[in-house]
Image (cartoon, rainbow, N blue to C red):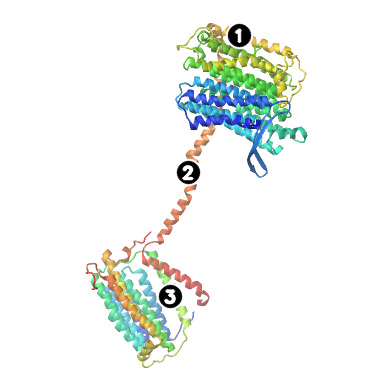
Amino acid sequence: MREVLFIAFSLFTIGAASGVLLSRNPVYSAFSLILSFFGLSGLYLLWGSTFMAMIQILIYTGAIVVLFVFVVMLLNLQTNRENSSNIVFLGVVSASVWLFSLIILRVLTRSIPNKILEIPENQLRTISKLLFTRYLWPFEILSFFLLVMIIAIFAITRTQEIAHGGEK
Amino acid sequence: MNFPTSITYWSHFVTIAMFALGLLGFLLRRNAIVVLMCIELMLNAVNLFLIETSMRTNTPDGIILVVFVVTVAAAEVAVGLGIILNLYRLKGTVNLDHFKSLQG
Amino acid sequence: MLSSSHILVTMILLPLLGSFLNGIVIRPAFAKRAGVIATFFAASSFACAVFLFFSLSHDVKAINWSTNWFTVGEFHQQWGFKFDALTAVMALVVTGIGSLIHLYSIGYMAEERGPSRYFAYLNLFLFNMLVLIASDNLLGLFVGWEGVGLCSYLLIGYWYEDIDKAKAGMKAFLVNRIGDAGFLIGMFYCYQIFHTIRFDEIAQLLATSSQFDLHLLNIVAFFLFVGASGKSAQIPLYVWLPDAMAGPTPVSALIHAATMVTAGVYLICRMNFLYMLTADANVLIAWIGAGTALFAALIAMAQSDIKKVLAYSTVSQLGLMFLAVGSRAYFAAVFHLMTHAFFKALLFLGAGSVIHGLHGEQNIFNMGGLRKKMPGTFLTCLIATAAICGIPPLSGFFSKDTILFSALASGSTQSSLLWGVALVASTLTAFYMTRMFVLVFLGNYRGEAHPHESPWVMMLPLLILAVGSALTGFLGVPHGLHFMPNLMGHYLASVLVEFPEQATLISEHAAMFVATGLALFGISVGWFFYSRPSRAESAYKVLKPMHLIFSNKFWIDELYGIVFLAPFKAISSFFSSFVDPTVIDGLALLPVRISSGVSVIINVIQSGLVQFYLMILLLGGLWVLWSSLKGWVI
């Protein structure tokens, strides 16, 4: 049973990823992205990582793709296809990506030992504990990093007519 | 090459397929926003692999790393979209073919 | 306390100082002021020469002065000057006649706009000529050699606004250059054989050891003669001298009659210890000398420009001097050099006086009857013409007869033939000089200007030179005539080697009679035909083809133009129109073109598109992956 689900979710995810790639409309691309995140979430669940499945849906689909759709709507982009018509470029890129993926595949299939799965309990508790003890440093720096990002976004996207002395 | 027969290795293929698709889209699509989306695809492929490895070897470190990756990805998307907004203000389009001022 | 060697250096440097003052420092605007300065320095140089002449005695054979110049490896070169008997004779002639010509120039160039340049060049010439004759080695001589060539060019092309005159100057310089190439090769050979280029050392080497290859010595002699023939206008390098008449007449008198053209003769006489031994070279020199004498005399017979007649006459007389050195009669050559300096300078200055009096007329067929209008010039030129024809007891008689008899007594198999050629040349000389004299001074005036006598600054040198032309012959009376010892011969015996006379067919007296008789014959023929215009015209009708050949100078200049100049110009134009823009510019621009082409190709990579750059990144990463994981992956 598990294998079937694996295959199903895998194919679903890959199909949605192709949808991102192949859609002319950027909104369609965004929706395909959501679908691929759902597929991924399912795969995480199949692996036993309940925590990450939730995080994936919450943050990725709930915040990031929403942001994408906001910007697409804001810019009112049209649906015309703007791909390059350079066959040589296309060919070279495809070939090199194919080669690259083969190499990586070979690397990956050799490096990980084959082991039986076990689903852990209380994953969230374990992770939280780790975040606040062993990985405290990166955690704090990350929060600082997020603050810096927020300020950076403000600085980048404000327009010049905003009055001095205040951030909008 | 030995192909793995166990199903649990399927996620390697998914990872690589998603990563390759993301790379292809990243290099071939002309719309800047779609390019950012493809970056997200690539990051998610890596997330999948990390989680799989972490669950397989029963170490929580992979999942912690995924937490961080997700956070940074979110921040990066925000900033990237801000930059694309500015580019749109400058040129009126987000077609990457038009941003060639470094040519020559 | 001034020693003689200091006076020697002073003698040489004084004209340089005068040139410097006239040319750079003061630059006077009036001919009189410039001329006075120049003449003062020339005359003081002459005074130094006289002083040095009296310093030489039985004990003091030479006065030396030298200082270091440069050293390259084992070659130590000095600036060395030596004043011995030969230098004394040359210096007295050069500075004495030079000073007279400087004085004359004050009157001749009185209306010039920029006289300071002229007098500066004239003094510079004197300096270089003194360096030439006083040097004790070949290289210093060559410095003076080049210097006089330069001054000749500057002075011939003095009126450079006339392009023909400028071209004449260039022609003189370039033909000289060909001779200089020969000189340099000779000097290099000399150094290779003797490992020195100082005259006294070479003389010593030749005297003491006999291991030198005669063939090599002949080669040295030949190349030095090439240089001499360039400077002294022998066949085939004489073509510059008639064109050099484009310069002012005093220049022609000084440089192309009295001093510079004799530098070649001086060189060979200075190296007489070498030329004594080289029989083959001597044969060549003698024949070229005799041939030039005859050839130039033939051309002079049909010239109508007074200066051209004198120019070819100079070439002819120089040929006689080379005949003398070819016959190893170095004293005869130097003697004739001295007397020729006097009467040829006098002839040129007289011609200048005529030209000046007629306000620029140079065609002898437009002159005549100047005996009454310019009596002073007439009398002095009469003496000079008689001297050049060889009328006793004037100087030309003694010197020319010494040469003729030396040619006859040289002992080579062709001596009689050479003597015959020289005799014919002398007869022709008498003929055309009389022709010129009659046409210029006798009869009635055929021109349109108002001739007048020249001022005293021009007449005084004429007078002094006339006295010299008349009397200097007595300094070198040959042994055959016993009424006076050969003063000059004894004086120069310390430097010039005597070649013993060989047996001859006829005695010296007989040869003298033959020569003088032929000279009188030439004079009478000339007087006969040219005193009445009708006789000249009838003779002209008969001899028209010969006249055509002679008056066109045997078309030698045109021949040189076709054989040498035209191919050279073709090669030059080929190089300048094709080789230079296409090949050389192409080569020079090749790096430019290559880098432009390469950069155009490389610019494809700089597309400005981020995704393109990232693809390159991907390719690079792929390559790194592959090369680092190759063994592990496969």
- Label 3's element? helix
| Residue C360 appears in view | yes
| Residue C178 appears in view | no
Q: Which residue is mark 2?
A: C582
Which tag is nearer the camera, tag 2 or tag 1?
A: 1
Which tag is nearer the camera, tag 3 or tag 1?
A: 1
State whether residue C476 is above or below residue C270.
above
Tell me the distance, in whole angstroms, between the alpha carbons under discs 2 and 3.
55 Å
Name the image quarter holding the C terminus of chain B: bottom left
Image spot of residue A56 (x, y percent): 32, 83
Tell me the distance, in whole angstroms, between the alpha carbons under discs 3 and 1.
119 Å
Image spot of residue C237 (x, y percent): 60, 27
- Label 1's element? helix
Circle 1: residue type: Val
User: What's the chain of the residue with tag 1?
Assistant: C
Q: Quadrant of residue C551?
A: top right
Q: Quadrant of residue B97?
A: bottom left
State whether residue C70 is above or below residue C332.
below
Q: Residue at x 49, y 41 (%)?
A: C580
User: What's the chain of the residue with tag 2?
Assistant: C
Q: Which residue is mark 3?
A: A101
Q: Is residue A136 left or right of residue C536?
A: left
Q: Which residue is mark 1?
A: C525
Circle 2: residue type: Thr
State whether residue A78 is above or below residue B65.
above
Circle 3: residue type: Ser
Q: Quadrant of residue B13?
A: bottom left
Q: Is residue C446 left or right of residue C550?
A: left
Q: Residues within 10 Å of mark 1 (few under 14, many from 20)?
A: some
Q: Residue at x 34, y 79 (%)?
A: A144
Q: C557 or C96: which is nearer to us?
A: C96
